[in-house]
Amino acid sequence: MEPEKWVQVLCRYDGKGIGLVVKDQGQGFNPNTVPNPLSPENLSADHGRGIWLMRVAMDEISFESRGTEVHMRKAQPRQPRAEPVTQCSALLAAVREIISLVERVNSSNKRGLTC
């Protein structure tokens, strides 16, 4: 949530699936210490679901560089639903939507709102 810092998203399709690497300039964290968002005491929290969602959605996930890099992989389905180019286009559209959401949250935070 600091506008002077950058987030880098790398995407690669290799014929077997899609790989993503998300890097940021934050201090990092230990993903093993993140509380379970499904625990009753965390259900009403306004944060803390991102790692859980990544673990559910992706086939592989690892945290590198003390948590400042997330490496994810989603294998191509056995019966491809779309051509690889279409799959990458859909992924890029999703990444653009995430960036747009982050920008909206950042602009809200500048007005003193919390998300």
Image (cartoon, rainbow, N blue to C red):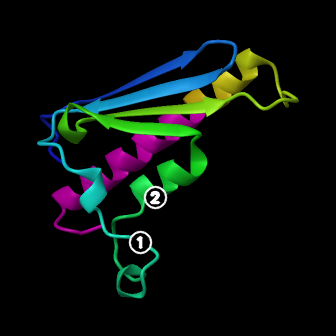
The residue carrying pointer 1 sits among few (fewer than 14), some (14 to 19) or many (20 or more) residues within 10 Å by Cα, namely some
Q: Distance between the residues labelled 2 and 1?
A: 7 Å
Where's residue 104, x and y in %?
Answer: 36, 51
Vertical order, 74 against 16 (above or below): below
Q: In this view, does 93 lie to the left or right of 52?
A: right
User: Mark 2 is on which residue type?
Assistant: Trp
Quadrant of the drawing holding the C terminus: bottom left
CB within 8 Å, label 2 to label 1: yes
Q: What stretch is highlighted in magenta?
A: 93-115
Mark 2 highlights which residue? 52
Where's residue 92, x and y in %?
Answer: 56, 27
Secondary element under disc 2, as helix, strand or loop, is helix
Where's residue 7, x and y in %?
Answer: 28, 32
User: Mark 1 is on which residue type?
Assistant: Pro
Where's residue 39, x and y in %?
Answer: 42, 80
Q: Is the magenta stretch mostly helix, strand or loop?
A: helix
Whether residue 107 is in magenta: the answer is: yes
Secondary element under disc 1, as helix, strand or loop, is loop
Q: Residue at horizontal 49%, vertical 48%? A: 54
Q: Which mark is residue 37?
A: 1
Upstream in the sequence, badge 2 or badge 1? 1
Q: Which residue lies furthest to the bottom in this view?
A: 40
Q: Is residue 77 left or right of residue 89?
A: right
